[in-house]
Amino acid sequence: MKGNFGAIVLMIVGAIFLAHNLDLIQINVFQLLRVWWPVILILLGIGMFFTKDSNDAPNKQDKN
């Protein structure tokens, strides 16, 4: 899931900007970012919290 979160975020952001450029949606993207930027930080934090780190693998130690 580690790579999936970043990919999903990039796809959503790209889709919003593309829809705005094609005049499919009539929103001011920069106004939304100016108001809702804390939500972006919260979502990034949640994504980082739930992604599995490579250091979380169990240690294999010989018991001799």
Image (cartoon, helix red, strand yellow):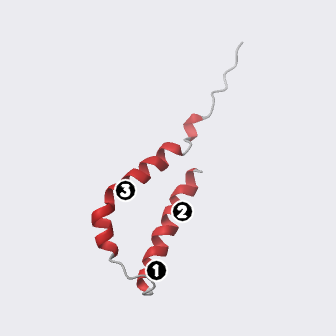
Residue kind at label 1, given as amino acid type: Leu
> At 70% across and 15% down in the image, what residue appears?
63
User: Few, some or many C-alpha atoms within 10 Å of disc 2 (few <14, some 14-19, many ≥20)?
Assistant: few
Marking on residue 8: 2
Secondary structure state at the residue bearing disc 3: helix
Residue kind at label 3, given as amino acid type: Val
Secondary structure state at the residue bearing disc 1: helix
> At 38% across and 82% down in the image, what residue appears?
26
Residue kind at label 2, given as amino acid type: Ile
Residue that carries the numbered disc 3 in the rendered image: 39
**x and y percentages locating residue 17 in the rendered image:** 43, 76
User: Few, some or many C-alpha atoms within 10 Å of disc 3 (few <14, some 14-19, many ≥20)?
Assistant: few
Q: In this rendering, is residue 44 above or below 60?
A: below
Secondary structure state at the residue bearing disc 2: helix
* In-front residue for pair 23/11: 23
> At 62% across and 34% down in the image, what residue appears?
57
Residue that carries the numbered disc 1 in the rendered image: 18
> At 53% across and 44% down in the image, what residue appears?
50
Q: Nearer the viewer, mark 3 or mark 1?
A: 3
Q: Nearer the viewer, mark 3 or mark 2?
A: 3
- What distance separates the C-alpha of mark 3 from that of mark 2? 16 Å
Q: Quadrant of residue 39?
A: bottom left
- What distance separates the C-alpha of mark 1 from that of mark 2? 15 Å
Q: How many numbered discs, if any? A: 3
